[in-house]
Image (cartoon, grey):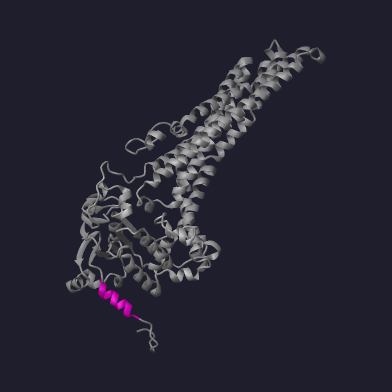
Amino acid sequence: MSDAQQTGGVSAGGEPRQSGAVGRLLAFAGPRRALTYLGCALSAVSMLVSFGPYICIWFAARDLIAVAPNWPAATGIAAYGWWALGFAVASIALYFTGLMCTHLAAFRCASNMRKRATAHLMHASLGYFDTHASGALRRVVDGCAAETEGLLAHKLPDTAGSIAMIVGMLVLFFVFDWRLGAACLVPVAVSLACMFHMMSGRGMGFMTRYMESLVKMNKTGTEYVRGIPVLKVFQQTVRSFRAFHDAIEEFTVLAQDYAVKWCQTPQALSLTFISAAAVFLVPVVALIAPGEADVARLATNFAFYAIFSAVIPTAMTRVMFMSEAFQSAADAVSRVEEAIAAPVVEAPAAPKAPRDNSVTLEDVSFTYEGADEPALDHVSFSVPAGATVALVGPSGGGKTTAASLVPRFWDADSGRVAVGGVDVRQMDPHDLMDRVAFVFQANRLFSQSILENVRAARPAATREEVLAALSAAQCDDILAKLPEGVDTVYGAEGVHLSGGEVQRLMIARAILKDAPIVVLDEATAFADPENEAKIQAAFKRLARGRDGAPRTVLMVAHRLSTVRAADKIVVLDRGRAVEQGTHDELVRAGGLYARMWADYERAVSWRISSAERGVA
């Protein structure tokens, strides 16, 4: 069954359906959605039963007033009391049973939302995670699912109870004395008018903006926490981290503008009227009492309505929170559906196997979502099997984009990316990933041992194979300084590594994977001279397979010293392949690469001198 069929919230084309938020939510609960309906029904019955004590009070007041002042003659008072107690206990029992049902459905719904969103994201293209921050995705997958629990477990049964309460309240308003009932409707009408005011104008769409602000604050907050060491080094505060500071300010302004400027007066007016509902009975009684034939009955009705009016604040407050909960749930389920609609790496019905390990880009164009200019514009080049091809060029030229199309982090908008003569879109994604190993400039280690971090590339690898890969990646000095060697847990008890050392561990992963194609993206970006020398030695080992045969290597580099020995160099500028050839050929051509090489040579020859002027 597809995600769309399971959730009922996403159409075949990936667009959210226009059905109600509650219906889309309940689709996640599966068979347990029936418990939601049962729980809501029990909650509604519970609310109707809760009116029993008020009716018993009316009967008791009627009998007492009828025999006043001979109170002992009212012999049915005790029975009314027991009936009232029975109604109260029954109401609580029904409500508790209803909540048990809705909680079981709510927990299953939230669990399924998390599972299905996570399972879908596991098949999403890796490029999707470059454009969606981890903090924002965590907020969507976990936070939005948690918000729906409150709606299904509490707000939905309370809504059913509120509807039953309002219907029952309106009936009781006019059962005993329609004039006093009409007086009780005045604060209800005022409260409803205030609510409509709060939900109109700025209130329309507030919950969507509110959730967007929360997601943004969560995302930038995660980035801020990761950047705390930098802030501390430079003695800065949160104001220096402009994105997080602005997100907090935006959320503050949004909340204050809505709560204070838009809702403060109508909310205060609503609470004042519904809390003083009994006050509206007094002038009505004063007007009708002089002409009333049965004053005792009027007094009984007045007592009933004065006590029963206490239900009004509860009913109206539930209605108010009910609308807020539905807005929140609608936004939450929409965001989860967006995550479930994330583009996935589709497996072809009849996958093809490549004939060799060559890589080819044929007239490839690609534009990132929301970008005005293409990242790649009709780019073509080839990497023969066993050859090393380097991508160089100015920043933003499209080097990383071109490399990321090979393992299908993204799919080309036009043109063809092929491995062994087969379009990568016609290959089984698992087969493609098994054939490609990649080392990026931004790598993260798990909070596990170094052994398990490297073994992640091939979980079935033995300890000896992991140690051999680490040695081949020039990591012996790293293991020597760790307290427990390869079994040291990264990040525990102050165990951290430099960027260059982490890069060597990533190369060890790639060596252990033993994939025939290797993609390197700025692999020496964080390396000091000593680490760079070791990384270069690790590259030479990585470029050879376990059997000694050369691997196919596509490398992205800014340090031109790392690409001199490449079999071919492709120069990318503004999304186009402007030059191709060996180092010597490109230098003789006198084009962009030759200028970049001249700049590089001047940079490496620059040094601080002890001469009188200070700089040579």
Asked if residue 110 is positioned above or below residue 616 in the image, the reply reads above
Where 52 falls versus 524 (above or below)? above
Name which quarter of the figure residue 507 lies in.
bottom left
Q: Is residue 320 visible?
A: no
Image x and y of residue 156, in percent: 53, 31
Please state which of residues 121 and 252 is positioned toward the viewer in this rendering.
121
Task: Please tell me whether the stretch drawn in magenta is mainly helix, strand or loop.
Answer: helix
How many numbered marks, from 0 up? 0
Q: Which quadrant does the N terminus fall into?
A: top left
Q: Viewer-proximal residue, 422 or 255? A: 422
Horizontal relation, residue 310 to residue 267: left or right: right
Q: Residue at x 70, y 21 (%)?
A: 84
| Above-or-below relation of 71 to 278 | above
Camera-nearest residue between 409 and 359: 359
Left or right side of 184 for 65? right
Magenta region, residue range: 596-606
Instruction: Name the residue located 45 percent from the left edge and 71 percent from the top edge.
Output: 477
Whole-percent x, y for residue 247 in the image: 47, 53
Can residue 92 be seen from the camera position used here? yes
Q: Is residue 514 left or right of residue 228?
A: left
* Quadrant location of the C terminus in the rendered image: bottom left
Instruction: Give x and y (percent) for residue 253.
Output: 50, 49
**Residue lying at the far bottom of the rendered structure:** 612
